């Protein structure tokens, strides 16, 4: 039965992929030739020049009508609302042109900021997902880590990280330029100048970065960075020293995350793999499967290895014990909050809703929804078939895995491929959790390494496979004309660029995170004392229980 | 062993990046990047993780 289901799933995926690729409709039958020759088409009218006088003649609503109120809205937002630069001259063509430009940038500012607000709210989702998957005796500590990661990350990013990541990104057309983010440290290698890190923007005051467009960019990028940081708190929960968490989060927010962020999004060497080395359009990561989720997931792996497993997680023979969380209700509610916030995460990454292909925001939002849905089904049916029950926490993780996986390709793929990517992600997260838990014997209370690490990497790779070349964000991407196209649609170079990103994440970013946390372990110590861990971290670390009125179960030393 | 694991993991990254200078062929670069990824995974799962499993708390 299981083999039949698996065979059906594979055939269904292949059929979906075939449907996604073969979309050329049959040509319509040619119309019959007309009996008489058609009359010659009339000549196009000559263009009529518009002058300032024409603009001045546009009628404004009568003040007497306005005084009666405007319930229908037809008299609100008219020629009188256009900003006039010189009241003596009155309204001119120049005023109209400037207003159109400002409107476009204002639309893009509002879109990017509101999307950023949605992503910020994901912190609440992560907090309750992680806390629900941990034991009640650690709830205060887990919530506090998720609460303060927002502040610690923001501080690190404001002081140092933003400058490193975006200090040399150059003009961002959707936001009106960001002209002051124009200093990038490069290295000359293989005959090319490869970007390493940015140099403008420390404290958001350095070198002219006290700028309206830079502020929008900072807010949006900062909430993404915080998502990466909060991932780590889940995998190291229930035994991570609070002081070590603060230092580790600061280091990731200030250095590790921004470094890869620069390479991928800040004009660094990964982004220019296409223009420099002919590899597709360079490493393409639309909203951060690699930059955010894989960085977070791989850092989580590094920290979990250093901190070690919880007491009682493994027997002396190395057999894994399940340690259930204390509140599944808030876990699944948190998953919904995250899914809601993801509408800011992916569609918001256009950095605008006007111009340069930004009307694709609807397509990106739908891709996001579909992949999340498919991920939840993939995980639910996998667990149902394997363990005879649909597991709630893994189904929630399946939704998240689908969302993580679609994050990179969301701007480049069609809905059918989104479902395929999400479905694979849902199954992958289940397999990965078992692998990390039972083979690697790395303890991860919330599955962060599998949800974000494994599926972040899958999302990066899926761009190189499924990008269909139909998107158009201003006629080029990564300095290469045309649209991002993956292997299945004809560009193998894009896959190589994506795999280089994967290699960088696994080989370089993991190493940096590991070394940084190793140093923290030497100086501060990462893990709490065994007595504190068995008692629960709420009292020893935070001084207060999350649930003071409940009777909590305390573990004794539980090896074997 | 931890130090060796760190070196091997980072070496995988260097192999992948070196592909850009060693060959201009897409297939050649693909091969080298895959070798690099595999090297890094050996460093993480085969060396680093094994080093930590030897001192795991559940073995004490």
Image (tube, rainbow, N blue to C red):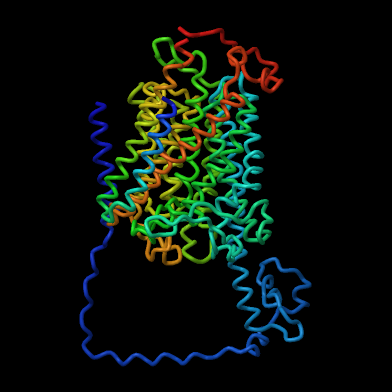
Seen in the picture, residue A120 relative to B39 is either above or below; the reply is below
Q: Quadrant of residue A326?
A: top right
Seen in the picture, residue A498 relative to A47 is either above or below; the reply is above
Q: Is residue B29 visible?
A: yes
Q: Residue at x 31, y 54 (%)?
A: A493
Q: Position of residue A535 (x, y in %)?
A: 62, 13
Q: Position of residue B15 (x, y in %)?
A: 34, 43
Q: Position of residue A254 (x, y in %)?
A: 59, 43
Quadrant position of the N terminus of chain A in the picture = top left
Seen in the picture, residue A291 relative to A363 is either above or below; the reply is above
Q: Is residue A489 visible?
A: no
Q: Residue at x 66, y 39 (%)?
A: A151
Q: Is residue A385 left or right of residue A443?
A: left
Q: Is residue A308 left or right of residue A71?
A: left
Of residue B32 and residue A58, the one placed in the foreground of this image is B32
Quadrant position of the C terminus of chain A in the picture = top left
Q: Position of residue A193 (x, y in %)?
A: 44, 59
Q: Residue at x 23, y 64 (%)?
A: A26
Seen in the picture, residue A435 relative to A464 is either above or below; the reply is above
**Mark count:** 0
Q: Quadrant of residue A480?
A: bottom left
Of residue A102 and residue A378, the one placed in the foreground of this image is A102
Of residue A17 and residue A292, the one placed in the foreground of this image is A292
Q: Residue at x 61, y 89 (%)?
A: A51
């Amino acid at each position: 039965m299981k083999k039949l289901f698996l065979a059906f799933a594979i055939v269904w995926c292949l059929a979906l992929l075939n449907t996604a690729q073969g979309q050329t409709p049959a040509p319509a039958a040619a119309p019959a030739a007309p009996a008489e020759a058609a009359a010659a088409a009339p000549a196009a009218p000559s263009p009529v020049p518009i002058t300032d006088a024409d603009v001045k003649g546009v009628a404004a609503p009568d003040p007497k009508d306005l005084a009666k109120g405007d319930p229908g809205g037809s008299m609100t937002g008219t020629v009188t609302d256009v900003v006039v630069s010189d009241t003596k001259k009155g309204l001119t063509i120049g005023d109209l042109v400037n207003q159109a430009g400002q409107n476009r940038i204002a639309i893009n500012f509002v879109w990017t900021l509101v999307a950023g607000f949605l992503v910020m709210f994901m912190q609440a989702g992560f907090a309750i997902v992680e806390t629900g998957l941990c034991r009640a005796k650690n709830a205060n500590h887990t919530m506090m880590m998720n609460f303060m990661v927002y502040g610690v990350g923001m501080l690190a990013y404001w002081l140092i990280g933003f400058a490193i990541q975006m200090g040399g990104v150059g003009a961002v057309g959707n936001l009106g330029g960001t002209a002051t983010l124009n200093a990038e440290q490069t290295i000359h290698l293989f005959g090319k100048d490869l970007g390493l890190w940015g140099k403008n923007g420390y404290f958001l005051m350095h070198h002219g970065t006290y700028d309206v467009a830079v502020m929008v960019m900072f807010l949006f990028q900062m909430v993404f960075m915080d998502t990466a940081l909060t991932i780590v708190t889940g995998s190291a929960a229930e035994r991570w020293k609070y002081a070590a968490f603060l230092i580790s989060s600061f280091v990731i927010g200030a250095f590790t995350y921004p470094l890869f962020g620069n390479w991928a999004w800040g004009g660094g060497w990964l982004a220019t793999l296409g223009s420099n080395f002919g590899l597709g359009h360079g490493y393409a990561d639309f909203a951060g499967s690699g930059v955010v989720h894989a960085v977070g997931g791989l850092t989580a792996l590094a920290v979990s290895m250093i901190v070690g497993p919880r007491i009682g997680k493994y027997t002396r023979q190395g057999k894994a014990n399940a340690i259930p969380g204390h509140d599944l209700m808030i876990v699944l509610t948190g998953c919904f909050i995250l899914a809601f916030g993801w509408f800011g995460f992916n569609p918001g990454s256009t950095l605008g809703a006007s111009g340069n292909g930004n009307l694709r925001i609807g397509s990106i939002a739908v891709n996001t929804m579909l992949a999340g849905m498919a991920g939840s089904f993939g995980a639910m049916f996998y667990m149902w078939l394997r363990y005879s029950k649909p597991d709630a926490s893994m189904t929630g993780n399946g939704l998240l895995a689908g969302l993580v996986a679609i994050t990179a390709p969301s701007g480049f793929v069609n809905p059918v491929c989104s479902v395929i990517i999400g479905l694979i992600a849902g199954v992958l997260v289940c397999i990965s959790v078992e692998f990390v838990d039972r083979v690697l014997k790395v303890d991860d209370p919330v599955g962060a390494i599998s949800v974000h690490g494994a599926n972040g990497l899958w999302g990066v790779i899926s761009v190189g496979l499924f990008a269909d070349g139909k998107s158009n964000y201003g006629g080029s991407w990564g300095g290469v004309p045309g649209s991002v196209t993956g292997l299945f649609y004809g560009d193998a170079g894009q896959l190589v660029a994506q795999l280089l990103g994967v290699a960088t994440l696994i080989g370089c970013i993991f190493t940096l995170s590991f070394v940084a946390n190793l140093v923290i372990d030497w100086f501060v110590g990462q893990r709490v004392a065994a007595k504190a861990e068995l008692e629960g971290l709420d009292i020893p670390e935070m001084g207060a229980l999350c649930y003071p009125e409940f009777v909590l179960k305390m573990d004794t030393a539980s090896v074997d | 062993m931890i130090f060796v694991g760190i070196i091997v993991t980072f070496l995988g990254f260097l192999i992948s990046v070196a592909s850009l200078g060693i060959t201009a062929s897409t297939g050649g670069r693909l091969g080298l990047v895959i070798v690099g990824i595999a090297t890094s995974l050996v460093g993480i799962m085969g060396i680093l993780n094994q080093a930590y499993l030897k001192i795991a708390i559940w073995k004490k």
